[in-house]
Amino acid sequence: MLHIENIAVISQADITFDKGFNVLTGETGAGKSIVIDAIGAIMGERTSRDLIRTGAKSARVSALFRELPPLPWLEEQGVGPDENGELLIERAIQGDGKNTCRVNGRPLLVTQLRELGRQLVNVHGQHDGQQLLDEECHLGYLDSFGGTGETLAAFSAAYSRTRELRRELEALQMDEGEKARRMDTLAYQIEELERAQLREGEDEELSQRREVLRHAERLTDAVDGAWQALTGGEDGEGAVSLLMEAENRMAQGGRYSEELQALSEKAAQLRCDADDLAELVRDLRGTLDFYPGELDEIEERLDRLYRLKKKYGGSTEEMLAYLDKCREELDAIQFSGERAAKLEQELDKARKLAQGLAQTLSAQRKAAAQELAGRIQSELTQLDMPKVRFQVEFAPKDAPDGMDATGMDTVRFLMSANVGEALKPIHKIASGGELSRIMLALKNVLAETEQVSTLIFDEVDTGVSGRAAVKVAQKLFQVSQGRQVLCVTHLPQIAAMGDVHFSVEKGEAGGRTFTQVERLDRARRKQELARLSGGQATAVMLEGAEELLSTAEEYKTGAEATP
């Protein structure tokens, strides 16, 4: 069940899709694509505030899934259907662009929702045919069908290791003159930094000490005055001795008064605090002692550190780190011959591992290619293309060591549209209708390996008509057996084959445009099929629509009866 609220021209819609083959039809611009966009939002696809209906503050989409198979994402996240076996996905889109996503009430990030969406729904759009024309996509299709993921991951790790080792080896391979110049530079920098005898935090300590010495006279007067007030010095009584006198007198009187005894205890605390304060002042006074020339020495040291900072880093910590780096680089250059020999051995070992995995991967792909070609050929025959030949061509990679990050294979799909014609790349000979059917055949075969329970075909019938349209309709119905299929179409042959038919219609009310989605009964289906066939529901068109429905029902009855 899909709930849409304030998405573009849809104010509110509730659509209950059934198992099997669901079709959506409607005039161009009626809003069929908006329904697909809403499903895309539930799948975690990118959205924007522009999707929000004009005048609304936010938009909301929710989808309720039932009878789901075990999904890896749910198991990994510790999430699952509720006690009724239902999984509710909700997504709210705010006017400020923020999104709120939930699965059975649990908050999710959009990226997490996208991962889940890929395991729930697979959308095949009208532009997928362009991907089929792009030979860069062919290898991905083949790997998806062949299930080569583990081998490909192992190869990718091994190949990445060879690249790392090669880069490290190249960095060591400099000519002797360049090596000597670099060693001289490093030796000079190391000697200069070591001679400076740097210490972490030294610059900050010296800056603080310089500030003290610059104001030493005023600080000394202040500290001496405080010391005199607290202790009384040699000539009189200070705060400490006066508080002690007060404490003693109140202690004596406290024998006869509880209140005075309490005050005596407070006086004792004040005396202790004053005594502690006097000790701290005395210690601070000791730090103010300096010897002649100390300020000049600090200024000279800070100036030297400043000049070094301009060359080697903004602090003593950064300069010490740079010193360590220089030492490591000098050691690496001095022992580069030994390191290079070791790297050569490691690279050779890593290259052999990568090549072995690449060969294993290639063998898996070639076995999968034969099966894929056979499956595609069978699907195309069912789609009224019995004369078409389909083949997967392999060529070696034009790359160092004959490998890149994808392996050692360059793969492309070839076809021959007519008997006697040579196999050629698909993009050179496939027409629009042929491309749609080849893509449908490929998607159908791949869907069997993906184990996705809901497939969406968004206007994949481009360039298809007549008898071919009937075959495409039959194929989509076959695909829907055992899973849910949603199909947006303009072809009456496909719409007639649906188990459930929805009409998407645009209207106006209160000066606003709105779109509504209606589930059609058989009578309304006839009218919609007549419109799809000829633009209007004339008697002749209605008769043709009835024939389409009856023929489709007969086909489905026979197909369901066939094991």
Image: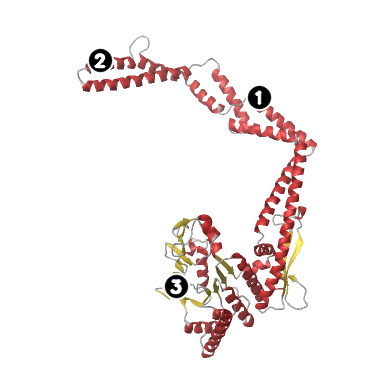
Provide the secondary structure element on which disc 1 rests: helix
Q: Amino acid at mark 3?
A: Thr
Position of residue 303 measured from the top left corner of the image (x, y, whole percent): 59, 26
At label 2, the amino acid type is Arg
Please give the residue where the numbered disc 3 appears in the rendered image. Answer: 513
Task: Tell me the mark number nearer the camera, choosing from 1 and 3.
Answer: 1
User: What is the CA distance from the residue labelled 2 to the residue labelled 1?
Assistant: 65 Å
Q: Quadrant of residue 278?
A: top left
Q: From the viewer's perspective, tell me whether residue 49 is left or right of residue 249.
A: right
Residue labelled with disc 1: 195
Between residues 329 and 312, which one lies in front from this camera angle? Answer: 329
Callouts 2 and 1 close, C-beta under 8 Å: no
Q: Is residue 278 above or below residue 103?
A: above
**Residue 341, how many percent across, how many down?**
77, 40
Q: Is residue 448 left or right of residue 164?
A: left
In the image, which is nearer the foreground, mark 2 or mark 3?
2
The residue drawn where x is 67% and y is 60% is: 148
Q: CA distance from mark 2 to mark 3?
A: 94 Å
Mark 2 vs 1, N-terminal side = 1
Residue density around tag 3, few if under 14, some if 14–19, many if 20 or more, within 10 Å: few
Q: Do we see residue 431 in this rendering?
A: no
Circle 3 SS class: strand
Quickly name the residue at label 2.
249
**Which of the pair 97/41 is nearer the observer?**
41
- Decide: marks 2, 3 in contact (CB < 8 A)? no
Q: Which residue is depicted at the point 60% across and 29% down?
A: 306
Using a 10 Å C-alpha cutoff, classify the residue at mark 1 as few (fewer than 14 neighbours), some (14 to 19) or many (20 or more).
few
Q: Which quarter of the figure has residue 155? A: bottom right
Q: Is residue 89 left or right of residue 163?
A: left
Q: Which image quadrant is residue 10 in?
A: bottom left
